[in-house]
Amino acid sequence: MSLMDNEIENLTEAPNCPRLQTLFLNRNYQLKVIHNDFFQFMSRLKVLSLSENRGITELPVGISKLVSLEYLDLSSTRIRELPIEMKALEKLKCLNLECLGGRITIPRGLISAFSKLQVLRMRGTYPFDEAVDDNSECLAEELQSLNHLKALTVSVTSDFALYRILTAKSLLGCIEWIGLGFLRDSKQLNISSFGNIKSLRYIMVLMDCQGLEEVKAEWEIQNSVIATEPCFKNLVTVIIYRCSKLKDITWVILAPNLRYLYVIYCDKMEEIISETKLSQVTVLVGTLNPFAELESLYLAYLPELRSIYRDALPFSCIKEVTVEKCPKLRRLPLNSNSAKGKKISLEGEEQWWQELQWDDESSRNAFHCNLHHMKRLQWHEIAK
């Protein structure tokens, strides 16, 4: 049954629906109250979606009546705590807690009670941001007890939280998305451990990492054996957003299949790939082919950015390059060979385009810049 987009304000009755198996209540933006008895006579319900009901701040304890529930979507609500009574949902296979807009309290022992859980999504939700007592089982440890878990998305806001995730070996094969935000006390971040996450397809350093000065990848080289291949093979998208002290993100060169790169509002970003650090990386992992799979490059509000890469690149897959408010960026790593057999969309401001420097006239003539339709992405568009 679908009751989506119906302007429902409250659910105070207890409908008698013993055979109901699916219920979609998405996008009832005025919905604020779900009575404890609402789910009382829905014992066969398998699918429940409350997504995008931002008026909902709590779940009724009566949700425990849904003993057959397998799929629960609470994404884009404002729920701040999961009731411990949810332990009764022993058949739950998929739980979506993405984009709750802040912290959520998850009672100890609740997640581990979902022994059949296969998918847990917590992108943009922060259950890992505080330390727990030594005698308490932390949430990361509970996740390790889920033997059927296949897909996990998670956001963390501290070094402690990150350590808890990256040292949980049983999780490394199912993490698809990991976001790092608000790392105020961290000046350096070593992301070499992310190379162990074989399923990782998305990493984000975002939103006011004000103290973060460097993101790097360092490995302990044992028995004089040097790695011969990049470590972030499955990484497709990287977003760097409001990391005001970062000067470069050279580590992205270790993601050979990177397709989308966004760097926005980084006040001290000077180089995307540092020429100095590049030599160190190439010694470590051998020959690299930078941005070989890159399709989209978006650079915006980077007042100190001077360079993307030292040389022109073939960019065999590039489709679009957008540059906005990067006044010191005078060169792009493009030449006439970069454009051969491809249609590349360049978007930028007119003054920036006029001041752009090229190796020769043929390189300039190989590209056309769209000066009138700047792509002004909103945060929700790039973070989805």
Image: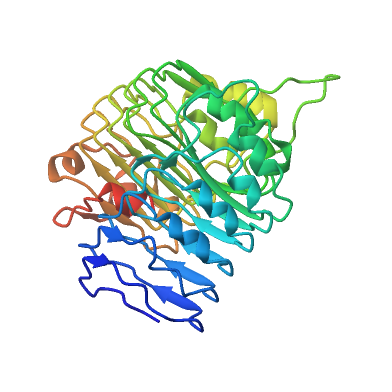
- Position of residue 178 measured from the top left corner of the image (x, y, whole percent): 52, 41
Residue 226: name its quadrant: top right
Instruction: Indicate the quadrant containing the C terminus: top left, top right, bottom left or bottom right.
Output: bottom left
Q: Nearer the viewer, residue 339 or 228?
A: 228
Q: Position of residue 174 (x, y in %)?
A: 65, 49
Establish if 24 lies above or below 258: below
From the viewer's perspective, is residue 69 above or below residue 16? above
- Quarter of the figure that contains the N terminus: bottom left
Answer with left or right where residue 116 lies relative to residue 367.
right
As drawn, which residue projects farthest toward the right? 223
How many numbered callouts? 0
Outermost bottom residue: 19
Residue 367 point in image, percent of width and height: 30, 54
Q: Position of residue 77 (x, y in %)?
A: 33, 54
| In-front residue for pair 384/308 | 384
Q: Residue at x 63, y 59 (%)?
A: 90
Residue 172 visible somewhere in the drawing: no
Residue at image x 36%, y 79%? 2
Q: How is the image coloured?
A: rainbow
Near-viewer residue (379 or 302):
379
Residue at image x 42%, y 16%?
A: 185
Q: Nearer the viewer, residue 349 or 18?
A: 18
- The answer to whether residue 100 shows anywhere in this view is yes
